Amino acid sequence: MTEKVVVVGAGYAGAGAVQSLEDELEHADVELTWISENNYHLVLHEAHRVIRDPRVEDDITIPVGDIASPSTRFVQARVESVDTDDQTVELDGDDAVEYDYLVVGIGSQTAYYGIPGMEENALTLKSLDDAHEIHQQVKDAASTASRNDPAKVVIGGAGLSGIQSAGEVAEYRDEHRAPIDIYLVEALEEIMPGQDSELQGTVRRHLEEADVEILTDDPITEADEDAIHFDEGDPLDYDVFVWTGGITGQDALDDTDLDNEHNRVTSESTFQTSDENVFAIGDSAIIDQGENPAPPTAQAAWQAAEVVGENIARAINDQPLETWSYEDKGTLISIGETAVAHDVQAGGVSVPFRTFNSYPAKFLKKAVAARWIADVSSLPRALKAWDSL
């Protein structure tokens, strides 16, 4: 009997899972279907580049036809829900796709934590359209500003996305000599909360050198159409406000019977969920790794995607599933045209310097993005994208 295997999502988890499944199930009696709202994969950890220059879009988007083989059926549609009883993925337009095994790699959406006005007034950076919208609003705000009355761009959340977004706005400001003041706002005491203090200090220094004003240790309590309000400090007016403060699961997982936390499906280290026919990886999942779950990062999604195909094949053949252990290969973060690297491993060997910047860090960050593009599509595409990364 032909087994129906379905993958939802075209992010790192989804795209990687499709290729992993194609490799593992090449000679099996399987019908593989890939479902995504977009007909391309976005290299999301480089999407902030579009804030500065929308022309890089072509280099960080990869058509699904360059990723999947012709034997994989692709369905472009938005996933509305997953019915685990009927084993169907419900799509917009009342269509549905049946499955025997499902890989949920649908990603996440921005969390607003119930802060009044945040969802209505803040921009986010979770898609290509989001990056274009930020670029346009920054451009429009700068066009009506002056040196005496500069545009104010506020980035909420000082994790990777917030820091990299602030860096791109700073590069746009400098390249166009635009009158823009940039603020990076973090509720906790330090930027990159939970990270090593050496990394935090190095990144802070680069942000300050880029004339980004950093405001910490005062949470946002409300956002209206032209200002954000704090627990203690005075309100901060803005012309452009971007919120990158956290993630939650997609609405499509609202009513599933799968165990979840804030719509992120909980899964074992085998990626199997509370339903043995559903596997979950990437940002849409909280994957058990013992004391702490796997982080919702690109590198975790890449690593998980390499293993999930094997486990689907094992499940089909009634074999024991492999357990997956996340391996942290370090942090690479860009701040405009510079970059910072921390605890990086190259070829399985730790780089001798814990934290470094300048050209070596920039080269490594480019190389990681290029390697992913080459792995998921082709080396020529990766080489073409190099200057944009």
Image: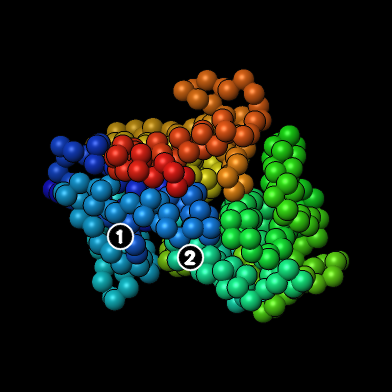
Q: Secondary structure at mark 2?
A: helix
Q: Is residue 106 visible?
A: no
Q: Which residue is mark 2?
A: 132
**Residue at point 85% right, 66% down?**
233
Q: Position of residue 387 (x, y in %)?
A: 44, 43
Between 286 and 39, the residue placed more toward the observer is: 39
Between 54 and 28, the residue placed more toward the observer is: 54
Q: Which mark is residue 362?
A: none
**Residue at point 54% right, 41% down?**
294
Disc 2 packing (10 Å; few <14; some 14–19; many ≥20): many
Left or right, residue 262 beside residue 310 = right
Residue 305 found in image quarter: top left
Residue furthest to the bottom: 225
Could you tell me the amino acid type at mark 1? Asn
Q: Is residue 157 visible?
A: yes
Disc 1 packing (10 Å; few <14; some 14–19; many ≥20): some
Are circles 1 and 2 on residues that touch, CB within 8 Å? no
Residue 338 in the image: above or below residue 262: above
Residue 156 in the image: above or below residue 294: below
**Residue at point 41% right, 41% down?**
386
Q: Which mark is residue 39?
A: 1
Q: How many marks?
A: 2
Left or right, residue 342 beside residue 265 = right
Could you tell me the amino acid type at mark 2? His
Circle nearer the N terminus (1, 2): 1
Q: Position of residue 218 (x, y in %)?
A: 81, 60
Q: Secondary structure at mark 1?
A: loop
Left or right, residue 322 beside residue 88 = right
Q: Position of residue 350 (x, y in %)?
A: 57, 22
Q: Position of residue 27 (x, y in %)?
A: 15, 37
Label 1 or label 2, whichever lies nearer to me, is 2
